[in-house]
Image: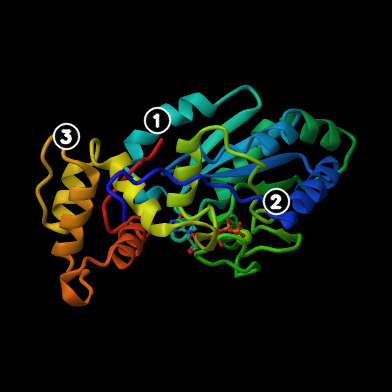
């Protein structure tokens, strides 16, 4: 690895995402609101300008997912930023908690006028929501959590959901799962890196060694203590990232023959530690 390692130029917008966005646009008229999933470790980076554009006339519930991987109190500022007249925010751990009731009641509150006018005419109305978000944020897991048994396929890599699937929650909210979608080019490289760190961009299109190097560079100021603790290393103020990376390599015995450091294995390990929450509670935004 070069000592003056340059930052990776990240881009991933395969054809199936364009198709998915087009289908979502068509389906939009059939739904009352959006459940817009954002990974709590990078909520603002997960805001897809394409989805935001699609959602501009819709009611939105922003679902901050994976809250078990962050300090809940650190989410307050994002909740304030995202809450609007037509948008509410809820923070959940989709793997464990049952958040169906709270999501159902927020949905009813956001659409109370529509429900009232239907009920006045004696029509019982089931609210319909489209679950959207960038890849791997937990859309399908959320849906499975809201239904009484697993209805959609989930997995810890981007691009698990392929087609469209309608399901009904225990409370009677009708949901449409959608494939994770990104946008054609990332204007802000930090946003692109954050999406790559949280696993929303396929690792196969990334150089994971460089990505892990960038990750250390991005977090070693704010989360120095977590790195020191996890890898049993000391980080000096202003220390070069390459030196920190090499210390992690040595401390974790990522060594090839002839005493050469195994940067690639070390890089994959660092990203995996972050993604699985073993590094500690980290917010990237
Ligand atoms: N720790 C934690 N993991 C979660 C949570 N929600 C989902 N996951 C995990 O995140 C990974 C991705 O979940 P999915 O539900 O498949 O994500 P998705 O948004 O449907 O992904 P695509 O269909 O690929 O866009 C899985 O390994 C889930 O177990 C959560 O609240 N906490
Ligand atoms: Mg999915």
Residue at the location (47% across, 50% down)? 196
CB at disc 1 and ligand 1 closer than 8 Å? no
Tag on residue 76?
A: 1
Instruction: List x then y, in percent, for residue 241.
Output: 24, 44
Residue at image position (31%, 51%) is 2
Label 2, secondary structure: give it: loop
Residue 99, x across and y down, in percent: 52, 51
Disc 3, SS:
loop
Residue sitting farthest toward the right? 121
Whether the residues at callouts 3 and 1 have beta carbons within 8 Å, the answer is no
Residue lying farthest to the bottom in this orientation:
257
Q: How many marks?
A: 3
Residue that badge 2 annotates:
173
Residue 133 in the image: above or below residue 47: below
**Residue 111 vertical placement versus 193 (above, below):** above
Can residue 44 be seen at all in this image of the molecule?
no
Is residue 169 depicted above or below 121 in this figure?
below
Is there any visible trace of residue 71 in the rendered image? yes
Q: Quadrant of the C terminus?
A: top left
Going 79% across and 32% down the picture, which residue do you hit?
114
Q: Residues within 10 Å of mark 3 (few under 14, many from 20)?
A: few
Q: Nearer the viewer, mark 3 or mark 1?
A: 3
Separation of residues labelled 3 and 2 (CA atoms)? 52 Å
First reached walking from the N terminus: tag 3 or tag 1: 1
Left or right position of 262 against 177: left
Q: Relative to 248, is 60 on the left or the right?
A: right
Q: From the image, tell me which residue sits under label 3.
A: 238
In the image, 45 versus 82, the foreground residue is 45
Q: Between label 1 and label 2, give the one nearer the viewer.
A: 1
Q: Residues within 10 Å of mark 1 (few under 14, many from 20)?
A: few
Residue at screen point 9% across, 48% down: 234
Secondary element type, mark 1 = helix
């Amino acid at each position: 690895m070069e000592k003056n390692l340059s930052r990776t130029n990240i881009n991933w917008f395969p054809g199936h995402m364009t198709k998915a966005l087009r289908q979502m646009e068509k389906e939009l008229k059939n739904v009352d609101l959006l459940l817009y999933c954002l990974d709590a470790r990078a909520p603002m980076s997960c805001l897809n300008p394409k989805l935001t554009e699609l959602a501009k006339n819709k009611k939105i519930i922003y679902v901050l997912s994976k809250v078990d991987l962050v300090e809940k109190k650190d989410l307050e500022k994002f909740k304030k930023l995202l809450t609007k007249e037509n948008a509410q925010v809820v923070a959940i751990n989709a793997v464990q908690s049952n958040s169906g009731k709270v999501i159902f009641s927020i949905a009813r509150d956001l659409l109370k006028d529509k429900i009232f006018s239907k009920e006045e005419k004696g029509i019982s109305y089931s609210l319909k929501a489209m679950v959207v978000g960038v890849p791997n944020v937990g859309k399908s897991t959320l849906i499975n959590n809201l239904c009484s048994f697993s209805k959609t396929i989930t997995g810890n890599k981007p691009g698990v959901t392929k087609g469209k699937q309608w399901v009904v929650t225990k409370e009677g909210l009708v949901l449409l799962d959608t494939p994770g979608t990104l946008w054609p080019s990332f204007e802000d490289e930090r946003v692109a890196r954050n999406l790559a760190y949280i696993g929303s961009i396929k690792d196969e299109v990334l150089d994971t060694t460089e990505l892990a190097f960038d990750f250390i560079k991005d977090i070693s100021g704010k989360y120095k203590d977590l790195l020191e603790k996890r890898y049993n290393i000391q980080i000096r103020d202003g220390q070069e990232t390459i030196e920190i990376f090499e210390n992690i390599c040595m401390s974790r015995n990522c060594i090839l023959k002839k005493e050469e450091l195994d940067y690639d294995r070390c890089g994959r390990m660092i990203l995996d530690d972050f993604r699985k929450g073993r590094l500690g509670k980290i917010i990237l935004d």
